Structures are given as C-alpha cells and as structure tokens.
Image (tube, helix red, strand yellow):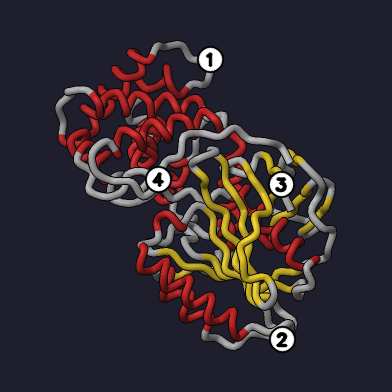
Amino acid sequence: MNERPKYELVDIGMSGEGAVARSFENQVAYCTAANAPITARVVDALRRLVESDEPGALLDRIRKWQGAPLADALPLRIAGGIHSLWLSRAQPELGPIYRGPKANGSAQDDVALVRDAIAAHEAPLMAWLAGPPQTNEAGRSSNFMAAMLWLADRGLPAVFDCLEIGSSAGINLMMDRYAYNLGGVWAGPIDPVMRFEPEWHGPPPPDRLVRIAGLKGCDIAPVDLTDPAQALRLKAYIWPEHTVRFERLEAAIAAAHVQPPKIGAQNAAEFIETELARPQAAETTRVLMHSIVWQYVPADQQDRVTAAMEAAGARATPDKPLAWIAVEADRTVHRHGTKVRYWPGGEEAIQLTWSHPHGADIDWLA
C-alpha cells in the first residue's frame, strides 16, 4: 500500500470555542491535499474574514455556529454559495479566483473579492447555511463497485440489491449504468453512461462477474436532476478545478431524463428499518451503501441504522447475506476510506481502500 502522511487528529464532532476556526483550517488543508487550490483559496478567504472583525450577519452566523462545524461541513456550505455566484454570473468580479489555478491574486486580494461578494449577496448566501452540501459525486461509485467485487470473492452471492442513504440526487443510484476499469479489472455494461478509470495503486480487486439487481435510496431533501435550478445548486458544490466532475454531472442529468433514479424523501433510519423488513430474494446480497453521508446523520439515527443492520445481520444466511459499504472521510489523513462489514461471517469492519474525495485515485488495501 502507499503510505499516506498523517495529519493532526481533528474531532469531526467538535463544537464550542475554536471549533469554527479549526473547521476552516482543516477544510483548507483537505482541499489542498485533494488538489483543489481554488476551493482552498475561497475557504481560506472565508476563514480570514470569519477571524477578523469584519461586520455582517452572515459572518456573525458562521462565527456563532451552534452545531459541529466540521461535521456540518460549514466551510463547504458557504463556499458552495460563493461558487454559485460565479456560476450564475451574479458576481463576475470573482473571476480572479475562479478562472483557474493560474489566476493572479494574493490572499488579501481573495479576502477582498469574497468580502465584496458577501456584501452584495448576503441574503441569498444565508440560505446556503441552511443545509449540508449536496455533492453525490459519481466517481465514488468506483469504491462501491470494488467492494462488491471483493464481497463476491469472499463467497457472497454476486447479485446485489443496493440501498443507499443520503442519496442527494441519486447519481450513485445509477451506478449500474456506469463502467469501471479498476486496476485492469473491468466491470459494468458495455454501453455505459459514464466510464471510470481511477488511478490505481496496489494489486487489483478480485476479477468477478457481478450484477446489480436493484438500486434504491433516500434523502431528507432529494434533489431532482431534471430541474435546472436544482442542478445548478449541485454544480455549485463541485470544486471548480475538477472540471471532469461537471462533465459527469451533465451525463448524470441526461441519464436521469431517460430513467430517473429511485429515491424517496425519508430519513436514513426510517428508510433502512423499512427496507430491511422487506423479504430478501434468495442468492442475493443486500447492501447498505453510503458515501460522505454518515457525518450528517444525527447520532440517534446512526444508532438506529447500526442496530437495524446488526439485527438483520444476525438473521442473515449464506444465500441471503447482508453487507455494509461505507465510503467516508478520514480527517486525519485527508482521504476517504472504504470500509465493509458483512453477515454472516465477517461482522468486523474491514478497510478496503484509501481514495481521493472524488474518486480520482484509489489505494487498494485488501
């Protein structure tokens, strides 16, 4: 495996004095490590404004954040709002930041540009603080597919019935329409909507033939990909330097117009409890999957989801097994880890990968 640098441990659930400042500092480091210098500049400018005595209702609300700012992705909420001003051309003066990595400007220049944008659009920017980012990056599905190949190699039925929580717009609920080259192992249809070929490190995953029999998800506020206004909001959460992600989103929008993903408005606990109560087809592996979602799920719902999965796992049989694939952020290394549990036989979580936040590269650990 490739060794990754260790960073100062940050408690994602931290709150109280100093938590807002730490969240912005950590997000700058995270964006920098993920080759997102433009987003890092925006977040750093926001950090400087928040830590200054600059007046304003928006900055005061950020300074007095009542929750856990890192778990709530507070820096990315407001960074998405700032990006939306550029995408919609509401604030073309942001060009020196968003025109690309070669754009000129000092940190002081960035602060002035972001301060002016806030002053001109404070009311609409307030709305961006109301909820977490809706990213749902399609590239993360490479981790899901790699995990399914691994599960099939462990002897679980290679037909998967997938349940996703925090589905946002349901982009990963269309992963059966995507093709993957995972370290030389190919999976997916021959005529895909999108192809993913992440830079692969380590041995390839097992080469197994898998089939996805079902994909269904939930979100407390589902996003309709076919609605231009909602699609623009999704684009605002894309880190602008990662241009391929805009292409992927357009491909996902086109795919949703052909056949929309199956996603309902429901919280994670209710959805999983309901779905696990459904009869399960024989010779099918039922899978709970999620990516960069767990930090947004309230603690009581996390407990309910975990309890429901473990109870269902206790009832699982070799011909009707249960698995849990989680692709979540590790703030100590500024990477995402893929962890898998399955029942019966492997109840402890096993980490399969480290990966880039948006699937650009994968380190295979299994």
Element under disc 3:
strand
Tell me if mark 4 has few (under 14), some (14-19) or many (20+) residues whose alpha carbon lies within 10 angstroms of its own: some
Amino acid type, residue under disc 3 in the picture: Phe
Element under disc 4:
loop
Mark with earlier residue (2, 3): 3
Mark with earlier residue (1, 2): 1
Position of the N terminus, as image quadrant, is top right
Q: Which residue is mark 2?
A: 282
> Please, is residue 108 above or below residue 157 in the view?
above
Amino acid type, residue under disc 2 in the picture: Ala
Q: Which residue is mark 3?
A: 196
**Disc 1 from disc 4: Cα separation:** 34 Å
Amino acid type, residue under disc 4 in the picture: Asp
> Please, is residue 233 above or below residue 241 in the view?
below
Q: Residue at x 73, y 47 (%)?
A: 364
| Dot 1 and dot 4 residues touching (CB under 8 Å) | no
**Disc 2 from disc 3: Cα separation:** 31 Å
Tell me if mark 3 has few (under 14), some (14-19) or many (20+) residues whose alpha carbon lies within 10 angstroms of its own: many
Q: Residue at x 22, y 48 (%)?
A: 66
Tell me if mark 2 has few (under 14), some (14-19) or many (20+) residues whose alpha carbon lies within 10 angstroms of its own: few
Q: Which mark is residue 102?
A: 1
| Dot 2 and dot 4 residues touching (CB under 8 Å) | no
Residue 124 lies left or right of residue 3; in this view the side is left
Amino acid type, residue under disc 1 in the picture: Lys
Can residue 245 be seen by looking at this rendering?
yes
Mark with earlier residue (2, 4): 4
